[in-house]
Image: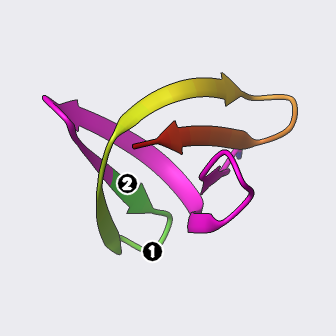
């Protein structure tokens, strides 16, 4: 399985083991493999599956 680590551009970790990302306007819902949900404000600037990482700024 391919879980993502979601980080800010400076490397600060927002969420780990993310398997589902839902975007509504400027809100991003990050759902983890165990069902935990983290909500952040901003926009996705990059998703790199090979590095298992998504970058959110804002």
Answer few, some or many: residues within 10 Å of disc 1's Cα (few below 14, many 20 plus, some between 14 and 19). few
Q: Is residue 3 above or below residue 36?
A: above
Seen from the viewer's position, the closer of residues 16 and 12 is 12
Answer few, some or many: residues within 10 Å of disc 2's Cα (few below 14, many 20 plus, some between 14 and 19). many
Which quadrant would the C terminus be assigned to in this image? top left
Q: What residue span does the magenta drawing correspond to?
A: 2-29
Query: Which residue is denoted by mark 1 in the rendering?
Result: 34
The residue at the point 66 percent across, 66 percent down is: 12
Q: Is residue 21 above or below residue 13?
A: above
Estimate the spatial distance between the alpha carbons at disc 1 and disc 2, rounded to whole Å.
12 Å
Q: Quadrant of residue 7?
A: bottom right
Could you tell me which secondary element the residue under label 2 belongs to? strand
4 in the magenta segment: yes
Could you tell me which secondary element the residue under label 1 belongs to? loop
User: Overall secondary structure of the magenta stretch?
Assistant: strand
Q: Is residue 36 above or below residue 1?
A: below
16 in the magenta segment: yes
Answer left or right for 29 relative to 1. Answer: left
Seen from the viewer's position, the closer of residues 14 and 3 is 14
Query: Which residue is denoted by mark 2 in the rendering?
Result: 30
The residue at the point 30 percent across, 68 percent down is: 37
Q: Which mark is residue 43?
A: none
Q: Quadrant of residue 31?
A: bottom left
Q: Point out residue 25 in the picture as x, y percentages from the top left corner.
A: 13, 29
The residue at the point 86 percent across, 29 percent down is: 50
The residue at the point 77 percent across, 42 percent down is: 52
Seen from the viewer's position, the closer of residues 34 and 17 is 17
Answer left or right for 20 relative to 16. Answer: left
Q: Point out residue 9 in the picture as x, y percentages from the top left corner.
A: 67, 45
Q: Point out residue 32 in the picture as x, y percentages from the top left corner.
A: 46, 64
């Amino acid at each position: 399985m391919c879980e993502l680590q979601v980080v800010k551009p400076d490397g600060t970790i927002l969420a780990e083991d993310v398997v589902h990302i839902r975007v509504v306007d400027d809100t991003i819902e990050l759902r983890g493999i165990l069902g935990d949900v983290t909500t952040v404000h901003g926009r996705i600037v990059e998703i790199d599956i090979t590095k298992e990482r998504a970058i959110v700024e804002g």
